[in-house]
Image (tube, rainbow, N blue to C red):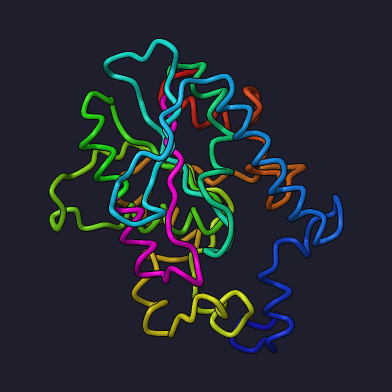
Amino acid sequence: MATWKEMKRDELCRQYSPSQWSHRMSADEVIKAHEASLREGTERARSITQTLLNVPYGEGQREKLDVYVPTNPSLEMPLVMYLHGGYWEALSKEESGFMAVPLVQKGVAVVAVDYDIAPGGNMDLMVSQVRQSVVSVVQQYAHISGVYLCGHSAGAHLAAMILSTDWSQYAVTPQIKGALLVSGIYNLLPILSTYVNEPLKMTEYVTILLLPPPFLPRFLLQALQSSGFRVTFEDVPDTDHFSIIERLVEPDYRLTQLLLKMMNRT
């Protein structure tokens, strides 16, 4: 099997295009269906839960959060921060509240994080923004029992970057108690020569700086386990890159239950 360094650009683009690997529909159709599913789920969550929309965590136009609050919030409720995917160049918090309903019903607050996607935002900025969003949440909601991260695809990479933060450089040290990283991309080097990097304009130097160490999922798993963390690697059957996160609207879905179990809310 060829390594990514030996692949031609066309093959690399194919390998790193999740829409090419869905068996449900064509590549264009699965992306449109994914965006529609997330948007509809977010609209539903906004219609049936208490919300605080467009809460600033910085001064930038997209440095805002949407907060979904349980009907009867406790003084020690857990809080999940969701970081959306979209290959760092698509989607926003407007499609990121879809997962709130089954969590809010269990007394969990959910925060959908926005950040500056490419081409307006570069990778350095995005990483800085999501880290600052965590600091802001901890400062604004001091009564929470702990922060839990959930990220999908590019959002899983950003969540991993949060986990690798040196918090001594910040005003607070967030109590991050758990993370659910879904279908993440952690090794950025292979995408340098693909269409993904055209709006990002990353150099090899930048990608190495922005690799959560270690950057391969199974190595990351082993490293976290050896550091004393309780970690599992889940293979979710009958899903693709898109449906695996869309189904977090379902209370009985495997990943929904894992997230709730992490917070002792099952």
Please state, as top left, top right, bottom left or bottom right, where the N terminus lies in the image.
Answer: bottom right
Residue 148: where, in percent of width, then height? 38, 37
The residue lying toward the viewer, choosing from 133 and 165, is 133
Residue 13 position, x and y percent, is: 69, 77
196 above or below 109? Answer: below
x, y percent for residue 230: 39, 39
Depth order, front residue of 228/240: 240
Asked if 79 appears above or below 10 in the picture, the reply is above
Magenta span contains residue 52:
no
Q: Is residue 92 left or right of residue 227?
A: right
Q: In which image quadrant can residue 71 be found?
A: top left
Q: Which residue is at 43% across, 85% downward?
A: 204
Is 114 magenta? The answer is: yes
Residue at the image point whose x is 50% and y is 72% from the top: 119
* Residue at image coords 47%, 42%: 82
Left or right, 109 with respect to 143, comes to right
Q: How many marks?
A: 0
- The quadrant in which residue 69 appears is top left
Name the quadrant containing residue 115. bottom left
Residue 22 rendering spot, x and y as whole percentages:
79, 56
Residue at 15%, 45% (x, y): give it. 172
Q: Is residue 183 left or right of residue 116?
A: right
Stretch of the chain drawn in magenta: 108-132
